[in-house]
Image (cartoon, rainbow, N blue to C red):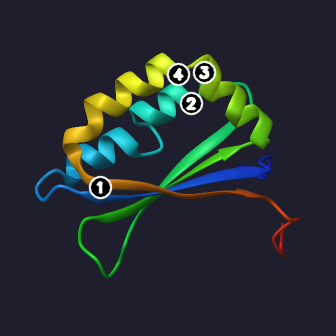
Amino acid sequence: MQADWGYVVIWEFRVQPGMEADFERAYGSEGRWAQLFRTGDGFSGTELHRDASVPGRYVTLDFWSSGEAYQRFRQQNAARYASIDAECQSLTESEAEIGSFARVGECPGR
């Protein structure tokens, strides 16, 4: 992950059984969401993580330069965002935004 981010949005997903591979393609770092986010100024990358203990549970981390950049992207791309969200809805049982977090300094060793 690049060190040039200052804001991260974290989502939790419960994936429909049997849909894991499709979900991973859509939500991974090269998936449909990341492709859309790349059109926005300030996007730094997406990470997808699978829970090691709970089957079908995932989190995404979407990295942005700032909260303002993320909010501007959401406003400018509301229709495309909603369209992809509707197309991907069948992949999940549930989704919830865990939260948005501002970076508080550098990690040791960077």
Q: Nearer the viewer, residue 49 or 100?
A: 100
Q: How many residues crowd mark 4 within 10 Å: few (<14), some (14–19), many (20+)?
A: few
Q: Which is more foreground, mark 2 or mark 1? A: 1
Pointer 3 with pointer 2, Cβ within 8 A = yes
Q: How many residues crowd mark 2 within 10 Å: few (<14), some (14–19), many (20+)?
A: many
Q: Residue furthest left?
A: 18
Q: Position of residue 22 (x, y in %)?
A: 22, 43
Q: Secondary structure at mark 3?
A: loop
Q: How many residues crowd mark 1 within 10 Å: few (<14), some (14–19), many (20+)?
A: few
Q: CA distance from mark 4 to mark 3?
A: 13 Å
N-term mark: 1 or 4: 4
**Is 36 rendered above or below residue 12?**
above
Q: Secondary structure at mark 4?
A: helix
Q: Position of residue 4 (x, y in %)?
A: 80, 46
Q: Secondary structure at mark 1?
A: strand
Check disc 1 and report the residue beneath it.
94
Q: Position of residue 71 (x, y in %)?
A: 69, 33
Q: CA distance from mark 1 to mark 4?
A: 21 Å
N-term mark: 2 or 1: 2
